[in-house]
Amino acid sequence: MADGSTTNFDAELTDAQDARGLGAKLRSFAKVNPRFAPDLARTMLARRDHSVVEAFNAHSEKTGYEFTSGWASNNIPFVTPLLRAFAGKRGDAPIRYLEIGAYEGRNLAFMDWLMPDRLDVTVIDPWFDEALNPEEKYHAVEPRFHRNMARTSFRSMTARKGFSTYELPKMLAAGEQFDLIYVDGSHTALAVLIDLCFCASLLSVGGMMVLDDYWHDISEIGGPGVKQATDQFYGAFGRYFEITAVYRQVALTKIAEIPR
């Protein structure tokens, strides 16, 4: 979950000293999709269990996971209640789970801890690409990912090495379907919009799609970012989704098939 946010994100949202900047940011939510603003307020006020982070970190240490970053910790208190409610509605049935952007597998390890023996996982990530991340340190990420995944209890695990913009069309052509999708890949608006459009078709009715890094309105390489793509996607296809939550992430539940 490379959201690039600070550990003081929650404080910044509620600190009166930051009210002017916050107001501008909140107004930007409603500019394209007016429904997002009340859902943001509702989610911000919802009760979140911050003890989950400590519990998962203890589990990670005990299991022997190898993580060099803690991005997932920013989102765990927010997303945990959503995932628990989602899993609870499905009883003991297996959950077909797609994750775009895995890095070392920290979020996957968290999902396995939260929903043990429930997930049939497909993950998409290029891991190392000379044009994208040429630094030598990135050579170690993929082997570390596989070592971490060997410690999980997933029902099944399929890793597709490549860019989601190329892999998702193949999966749609093959007729694959998922109950839960986590989108945390590229932060450029073009790539994000492609991801969302394909994921919308891959997601089963009643399934939930969690879109990470919604606050990124400028990508790391410049140009429009995640927020613009998410707003445009919802502007076009919002009638087929119910807004489940809005905060660092946007969670959408599919309520009808999209004609195509």
Image: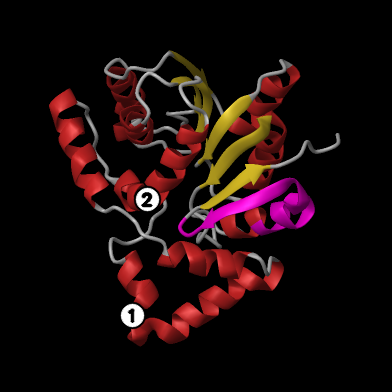
Which residue sits at x=66%, y=50%? 242
**In the rendered structure, which disc, 1 or 2, sits on the residue that comes first in sequence?**
1
Amino acid type of the residue that numbered disc 2 sits on in the rendered structure: Asn
Task: Kindly identify which residue carries mark 2.
Answer: 75
Task: Kindly identify which residue carries mark 1.
Answer: 15
Magenta span of residues: 231-248
Image quadrant in which you'd find residue 26: bottom right
Left of 102 or right of it: where is 89? right
Left of 118 or right of it: where is 146? left
Q: Is residue 127 above or below residue 195?
A: above
Residue 107 appears in the picture as rendered: yes
Look at the image and say whether residue 57 sits in the magenta stretch. no
Look at the image and say whether residue 241 sits in the magenta stretch. yes
Residue 37's disc number = none
Image quadrant in which you'd find residue 83: top left
Identity of the residue furthest to the right in this view: 260
Amino acid type of the residue that numbered disc 1 sits on in the rendered structure: Asp
Is 190 or 151 nearer to us in this picture? 151
Which residue sits at x=51%, y=59%? 216
